[in-house]
Image: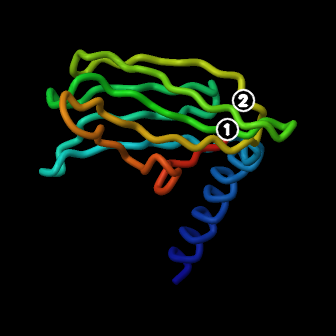
Amino acid sequence: MIILRRVAATLAVLGSVAVAPGAATAAAGQDALARVYDENSRVLAEAYFESTGDSFAVTRRAGAGERPYVEYRYVRKDGTLREGTHWGSGTVGETVRFDHNFGEGRTVTFRVCMRAGHGPDACSGTEFGENWTVGTA
């Protein structure tokens, strides 16, 4: 019983040490990943939002389609909407990065799409903003 109390006390101390450094970074942003899939659940492309650098990384993961792209929306502090599109590479596995300077703590919504040769593009969310991925700068 004494051994279990010592182990529990040691774990409690270790747990508080591990939590303390994270508390200082709680105000930091939130990274996010969006993926678009084909009808066989194969990942066609992905877009990653990295909050620390306010950047997007777009990667083509499969050979279907033409080029991946990420569409994003962001509301500035003055209330105006900023929208944009970044195109990735047509080469499978190649990542293209795009840097921004979003206001700290601001929400960034985005989706990743794969440009189709024929028909509609495959996207991780609708053109109306449904199912878009959310990150925080």
What kind of residue is marked 1?
Answer: Tyr
In the rendered image of this protein, does residue 106 appear above or below residue 128? above
In the rendered image of this protein, does residue 81 appear above or below residue 128? above
Quadrant including the C terminus: top right
Label 2 neighbour load within 10 Å: few <14, some 14-19, many 20+: some
Looking at the picture, tell me which residue is in the foreground, 44 or 122: 122
Residue at coordinates 39% horizontally, 27% vertically from top-left?
A: 69
Residue 61 relative to residue 104: left or right: left
In the rendered image of this protein, does residue 9 appear above or below residue 103? below
Query: What sort of colour scheme is used for the picture?
Result: rainbow
Looking at the picture, tell me which residue is in the foreground, 6 or 20: 20
Coordinates of residue 85 in the picture (x, y in percent): 50, 26
Residue at coordinates 46% horizontally, 56% vertically from top-left?
A: 131
Looking at the picture, tell me which residue is in the foreground, 92 or 69: 69
Q: Of the residues under marks 1 and 2, which one precedes in the sequence?
A: 1
Coordinates of residue 66 in the picture (x, y in percent): 23, 23
Label 1 neighbour load within 10 Å: few <14, some 14-19, many 20+: many
Q: Which mark is residue 102?
A: 2
What is the C-alpha distance between the residues marked 1 and 2?
8 Å
Report the residue that reaches farthest toward the right: 78
Q: Which mark is residue 25?
A: none
Coordinates of residue 56 in the picture (x, y in percent): 51, 27
At mark 1, the secondary structure is: strand
Task: Please give the residue where the numbered disc 1 appears in the rendered image.
Answer: 74
Q: Quadrant of residue 114?
A: top left
